[in-house]
Every structure is written in C-alpha cells, then in structure tokens.
Image: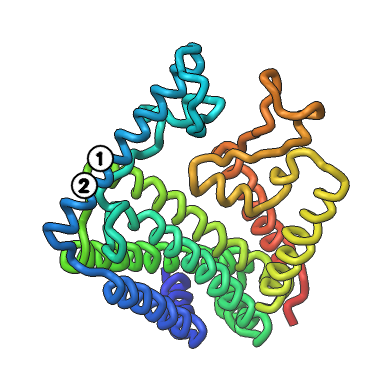
Amino acid sequence: MNLVRAELERLSARRFVQLMVVLLVLAFAVTAATTMAGSHKPTASELNSAREQAADARRDLEATHQECLARQAGTLPADTDRYLPSDCSAVDPIRQDRLPIAADYLPGVFTFAEQAEPLLYFLIAFLVLFGFLVGASYIGADLNSGGVVNLLLWRPRRVTVLAAKLGTLLGTVLVLALLASVAYLAAFWVIGQTAGLPGRLDGDFWRSLGVVHGRGLVLVLLASALGFAIATLGRHTSAALGAFAAYAVVWELGARLVLEIVDARKSDLFMLSSHIGAWLNGGARFYDERLCTGGPGLNCDPFYTITSSASLLVLLVLAGGLTAAAFAVFRRRDLI
C-alpha cells in the first residue's frame, strides 16, 4: 500500500501530467464555449417551421418507398423521372437508423441528444492521447533519470515495482477519465437546457451513450498500458512517441498504399485504426470490390464486417503482449 501511495504522489507531482490535465480542461472549456457561442434558444416560430419540414421529409421518404415498391411490382408509370434506388429497403422508413426530426432543421441550435455522441467521441480521442502520453512519460522519465533504480533500493522487487507503477497509472487515468466524462457531458447538457434544446433523452439514448462511453474507457486504459509498455521496452518516453509516429507513417499510410497497389483483399483487417473504430462502434462494415472478381452482383457481396469482439481481441493481444514483454525485459536487464 505504501508503494502505491508513493507512486500516486510521484505521478501527480510530475509536471507533464499536470500540464496534460491543464490542456484537457482547456480543450473542454474551448469546446464548450464555442458550442455555446454558436447556439441559441429556438423561438416558437423556428420550432414550428422545423417540425413542418421534418414531417414533410418523413412523408417524402414514405412516398419514395411506395414508388419504389410500385416500380418493382410493375405498376409505376414509365414516364417518371424520379430517382429510385435498386434496393427499396434503402428508403424504407422502418429500416432507417433514424427518421428526420425537428432538430435537423434548426441550424445554429445545439441539441444535446443529437450531438452528445459525436462530442463523446471527441472526448474519448483526447483521453486516449492523454493516457498514451502520460503512460509513456511516467515510466520513461523514471527509467531515463534513474528514479526506478532509487526506488528499487527501497523495494528491491522489480515485478512488484513495475506492477505498482502500471496499476497506479491505470487507476489514476480511469478516475480522471470518469471525472472528465461527467463534467464534460454535464456541461453540454446545461448548454442544451439553456442555449439550445435537450432533445429526446430517453432510456435508449442513455444506454447507447453508456455503451460508447464504456467502450471508450476500455480503449483509454489499453492506450495507457500501451504507452507504458513501449516506453518500458525503449527505456525512454521518446520510444513510445517514435513507435507511434513510425506505425502511423509506415503502416497506416505506407502499408495501406502498398496493399492497394498489390490488390490485397480485406486490407482494413490489417489496420489498427479499423479495429479501434470497430470496437468503438460495436462493429464496422467495409467495402472491397476485389471480393467480387466479376463485379458486384446478386450472388456476390462486396462488403465484409469486423466485429467488436474480434477487434477487442486484437487490441487486447497487442496491449497485453507488449505489456508482458515489458515486464519480462524489465525483470532481467541492467537498469544502470
């Protein structure tokens, strides 16, 4: 317990961690202030107009679906020039993810129910970066400055010391992420109440937001462990930053281009960004025309799916494997 308390004090005292927390608060404040400045409480006439436009859009969608069905049945007049999709399910109101609502026709009005999820994705992205950088600098600076050696003189158990550092890091990042999430969403909820619209905040909305938030927290913890592990292996914070930059340039950009040139199938399966997106969104669907050599047709589906469970497994193997390697190397190598 004394070791964890000591590590918590060391982590909170680091200037880089304090700077990152300040930047986190600053980014949230700027986002909230920009949103409030660009929004206003809609008037009664604006609401009525928006409701009428949304109703017209829903009626138009239903009419398009009926015309599409009539064309398939052969009862649609031949002289119609209206565009109709080949698959009528694309315009079936029942199959739509969401129907047009009044908020869609209120430009300059912030609607919390409609904007909360995109804002939450922004929060998750910032927290992932925060966790990765803090995790890398926390262990990297100690290894480079000799702080770990001094700590081992007091507690000469390498695995215990490194595990305490990792556990303290993950616990601290998790608490900060939870506090930031509550403050962040509460701020925008207040903006929706005072300078916009709250929207439809039913049980389905909160459940969906909770699922995205939970997946995001898992990603934040994995990113923190990943930064910690790479910096431990490289014995310096810059090792994690260099590895991140090298992966982004060499693999996400370079290898993706090479895979496109050689006509590799399902190339997105090999990209970490695809798995991150699939995990956050509960799955992802990708288009690859190479799956249909004769071109897309009735008997060929050019789409393939990455499930969230498969993506989570990839992320766990990557973070867990590098963390295990970091512990194995740290246990045996010379720290001087």
Mark on residue 324? none
> Marks 1 and 2, Cα distance to the nearest angstrom?
6 Å
Q: Is residue 108 left or right of residue 165?
A: left
User: Residue 311: where, in percent of width, then height?
Assistant: 60, 43
The answer, for residue 201, to whether it is visible in the render is no
Is residue 239 visible from the viewing direction of this image? yes
Front residue of this view, candidates 237 and 117: 117
- How many marks do you count on the picture? 2
The residue that appears at 61% across and 84% down in the rendered structure is: 147
The residue located at (53%, 30%) in the rendering is 85
Residue 306 rendering spot, x and y as whole percentages? 61, 38
Determine the residue positioned at 79% across, 63% down.
250
Circle 1 crowding by C-alpha within 10 Å: few under 14, some 14–19, many from 20: some
- Farthest residue to the front: give it: 79
The amino acid at mark 1 is Ala
Residue type at mark 2 is Arg
Position of residue 82 relative to residue 79, above or below, is below
- Residue found at x 18% / y 62%: 42
* Residue extending furthest toward the left: 44
Q: Is residue 77 above or below residue 254?
A: above
Question: Which percent across, then down, holds residue 93?
Answer: 36, 30
Helix, strand or loop at label 2? It is helix
Q: Are marks 1 and 2 in contact (CB under 8 Å)?
A: yes
Residue identified by numbered label 1: 55
The reply, left or right, for residue 153 in relation to residue 239 is left
**Residue marked by disc 2:** 51
Pick the quarter of the image with the C terminus.
Answer: bottom right
Q: Residue 237 vs residue 170: left or right?
A: right
Q: How is the image coloured?
A: rainbow
Secondary structure under the numbered disc 1 in the rendered image: helix
> Is 259 above or below relative to 194?
above
